[in-house]
Image (cartoon, rainbow, N blue to C red):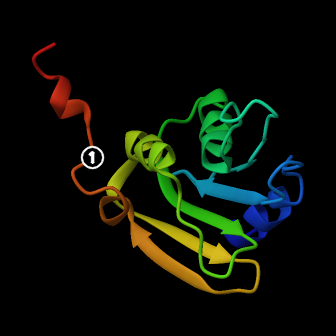
Amino acid sequence: MTLRDAAAAVRENAYAPYSGFKVGTALRTPGGQLFAGCNVENVAYPEGTCAEAGAIAAMIAAGETQIAEVYVIADSPNPVPPCGGCRQKLAEFAGSDVVVTMATVDGVEKAMTVAELLPGAFGKGHMDNV
């Protein structure tokens, strides 16, 4: 299964009764394992969970800690980028050169690296004096 197929399939399971904006994310580890997540809204905004965070949580729950590739899809006029918090979450588990492909359900895609999405990311090196 491709990352696009996995992200599109899990997007259909999104729980988005308030916004109607369903997002699906699939990521692949360096070993080839695939993990997917969808957004889960909550009536008490902002207590929901983003699709990227769900995919990362599934990866961690399976004992994996590295991301090699990411795909995010939504029904949007333009490819939808991860929110700021998810960019930081991706940077925690993905190298700066990891490609994040953002897509629309109509097939428009835009690829960027984690470094391009989050320049100047806060990283482990900032904690060296702790």
Q: Position of residue 99 (x, y in %)?
A: 44, 67
* Secondary structure category for the residue under label 1: loop
* 41 lies above or below 87: above
- Of residues 107 and 4, which is closer to you in this image? 107
- Of residues 6 and 47, which is closer to you in this image? 47
* 111 lies above or below 28: below
Q: Position of residue 96 (x, y in %)?
A: 31, 56
Task: Work out which quarter of the rendered image holds the C terminus and state it.
Answer: top left
Q: Position of residue 45 (x, y in %)?
A: 70, 35
Residue 114 left/right relative to 7: left
Asked where in the image residue 10 lies, by quadrant, the reply is: bottom right
Q: Residue furthest left?
A: 129
* 46 lies above or below 16: above
Residue 46 left/right relative to 70: right
Residue 9 left/right relative to 79: right
Residue 23 left/right relative to 53: right
Q: Which residue is mark 1?
A: 121
Asked where in the image residue 128 lies, by quadrant, the reply is: top left
Q: Residue furthest top?
A: 130
Q: Amino acid at mark 1?
A: Ala
Q: Position of residue 60 (x, y in %)?
A: 59, 31
- Of residues 23 and 97, which is closer to you in this image? 23
- Which residue is at 63% across, 64% downward? 72
Crowd band around label 1 with a 10 angstrom C-alpha radius: few (<14), some (14–19), many (20+): some
- Which residue is at 71% across, 36% downward? 48
- Which residue is at 69% across, 30% downward? 47
Task: Work out which quarter of the rendered image holds the N terminus and state it.
Answer: bottom right
